Image (cartoon, helix red, strand yellow):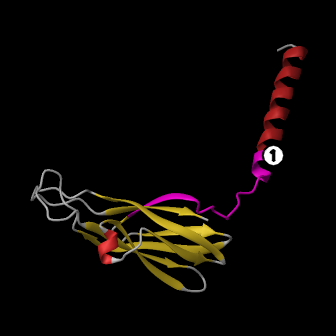
Amino acid sequence: MSVKQIKIVLRGVIILLTLLVFFQACEKSDSTDLMGSLILSANETKNVAHQGKNITITASDFNDSRCPPNANCIWEGYASVKITFKDDVKTQDIVLCLGGCNIVTIPVIDKVTLNGTTYKIKLEEITPYPTTDKNKPETSKAKITFSE
């Protein structure tokens, strides 16, 4: 190897080491922004780090009486789910609904306060949608959205 080639290799090594040190020095923030969507399966608990504190979110008590496609129903029915939020201070339960919620007076959107920040929680979807098929149903899942 010539001196010129050695200098080029050494410059590359120095640049690479500098980049490695730079990326190693970067710290990941433990504050997760809860804004956006989250999908929870039935009785699944998700742990989320928020503002340096742990929050657990659990979906349970799925109820689904929505009218399946191609079925003759008297009313549209509704689907609901209980969401439990637990932070370092308290546990909060909310029940959210889709469909004919005005008849059963269950909200589609509710609020929770987590570590001092209040969020609107909206139930976007409950899957699977009911069918007339009598096969074993899939595990119920709820898609919720956080906003301020």
Amino acid residing under circle 1: Phe
Q: Is residue 130 above or below residue 12?
A: below
Quadrant into which the C terminus falls: bottom right
The residue sitting at the bottom extreme is 90
Answer with the quarter of the image where residue 88 lies.
Answer: bottom right
Instruction: Identify the residue position indicated by label 1 in the image.
Output: 22
- In the picture shown, does residue 84 fall above or below 97? below
Picture coordinates of residue 41 (x, y %)?
35, 64
x, y (%) of residue 133?
11, 55
Asked if 9 appears above or below 102 in the picture, the reply is: above
Q: Is residue 32 magenta?
A: yes
Q: Is residue 145 magenta?
A: no
* Horizontal side, residue 137 vs residue 48: left or right: left
For the residue labelled by badge 1, is the local secondary structure a helix, a strand or a loop? helix
- Say left or right for 134 vs 32: left
Q: Which quarter of the figure has residue 114?
A: bottom right
Q: Which quadrant of the figure has residue 106?
A: bottom left
Q: Which residue is painted at 75% across and 57% down in the image? A: 27
Q: Is residue 72 left or right of residue 83?
A: left
Q: Nearer the viewer, residue 8 or 24?
A: 24
| Magenta extent | 21-40
Give the image location of residue 13, x and y in percent.
81, 32
Q: Position of residue 109 (x, y in %)?
A: 47, 68
Q: Nearer the viewer, residue 130 or 23?
A: 130
29 sits to left or right of 132? right
